[in-house]
Amino acid sequence: MNYNKKTVKDMDVKGKKVLLRCDFNVPMAKDGSGVITDDKRIRAALPTIQYLLDQGAAVIACSHMGKPVATFESYKKKQLEKGKDEASITEEKWKKSLAELRMEPVAARLGELLGKSVILADDVVGPDAQAKAAALKPGEVLLLQNTRFEKGETKNDPALAKAMAAMAEIYVSDAFGAVHRAHASTAGVADYLPAVSGFLIQKELDFIGGALANPKRPLVAILGGSKVSSKIGVINNLLEIADTIIIGGGMAYTFSAAQGGTVGDSLLEEDWKDYSLEMIQKAKDKGVKLLLPVDTVIADDFAPDANSQVVKAGGIPDGWQGLDIGPETVKLYCDAVAGAGTVIWNGPMGVFEFEKFAAGTKAVAEALSKTDAITIIGGGDSAAAVQQLGYADKMTHISTGGGASLEFMEGKELPGVACLLDK
């Protein structure tokens, strides 16, 4: 995939209407109050929006929010699949589920952050959106309703993409968290408008794309998380690029079991043991250092206050489970990071949400904060860990898309990036 894409700075946007795809899929309070609990994604879009406004553009912003079900028939089918009683499934409940995913709170918060009112459409491509888009003046911002209220959005329906594109003259993609999906608002609209990236996507392409295509060496990749199956594509691709790959988290136990170790009640993907051995062999063949835990912190229960002890990797007794990397492993991994030129980290080293089993993740985050290497955090739990620990400002780049950054690191084509104009 070509990472060298045109950006908003390559376009003359003065007096133009710009359709801007943002990622405003923000977490909301669960009490239905409409309170946004974290506005980080809205703030992330501000540089691109402000630039467009300063350049004299009229901005038509759009985003999805949650997973609304566009029709009552589909809603009913999903509820029945969940085992709900048919009599309890009503149109009122469906409409309430949609109301909770409307964009009003986002428009209000975006307006506060921009210091100007944001016009909100009642629909995505309906009469209200079309009328407000037609009347929009340079320096104004219009926010469309939740793009997933349109059933054609996730199907990349050409008619929906064409209708969205008809409201604008240029398309700017700045929702990195959604570029791995070929939806109408992330990829389809680029068939009808000149399409470029915003600053957020440009940054992701520069850092992650740069680390994959031309890294400052040695390149060290740290991969954690629970399952080998979810990271196997990433491991496979990074074995072609990295100098060292570090394995932590739950997936380390599948590697351990594959080599004949005992893992007790730890997370284990039996079907992936052979593949783990293939990865170990591939690393040897490629001359890549593949570092696996040498010791592990085990617990007698999956609980924050469980009894714990440190044992050698591959020596976990029955009734116990591995919940973190051990102190010898921490030293091994931190030493590997210390000499790196570039570090990519995706996935915690243990059960980070339990304080007792967060030491490995904390140590890796601290090691990254002290290194002179380019440090790239691949979204998701790793990004949350770095932010919670207060090391966010010490990292070179923290990705805004967990799923997108993973697919990026797998070497997969991202539809929402591939559709943009090449430089």
Image (cartoon, rainbow, N blue to C red):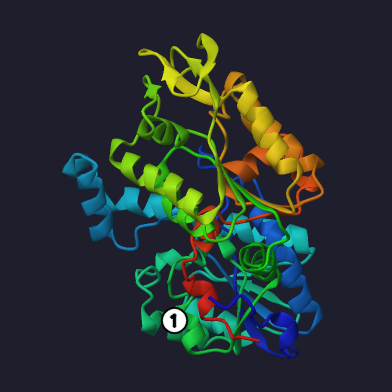
What secondary structure is marked by label 1?
helix
The reply, left or right, for residue 419 in relation to residue 321 is right
**Residue 123, position in %: x, y?**
47, 71
**Residue 198, position in %: x, y?**
67, 73
In the rendered view, tell whether residue 307 sits above or below residue 376: above
User: Residue at point 71% right, 70% down?
Assistant: 199
Tag 1 residue: 161
**Residue 63, position in %: x, y?**
54, 65
Q: Quadrant of residue 4?
A: bottom right
Q: Is residue 341 or residue 146 the one in the foreground?
A: 341
Q: Residue furthest top?
A: 307
**Residue 328, position in %: x, y?**
63, 24
Q: Is residue 224 or residue 252 the one in the foreground?
A: 252
In the rendered view, tell whether residue 131 sits above or below residue 349: below
Please indicate, yes or no, whether residue 362 appears anywhere in the rendered image.
no
Q: Is residue 135 or residue 195 the one in the foreground?
A: 195
Q: Quadrant of residue 172?
A: bottom right
Please indicate, yes or no, whether residue 187 appears anywhere in the rendered image.
yes
Residue neighbourhood size for the residue with mark 1, other residues' Cα within 10 Å, grouped as few (<14), some (14–19), many (≥20): many
Q: Residue furthest left?
A: 86
User: Residue at point 54% right, 59% down?
Assistant: 409
Of the residues shown, which amino acid type is indicated by label 1?
Ala
Q: Is residue 14 or residue 329 the one in the foreground?
A: 329
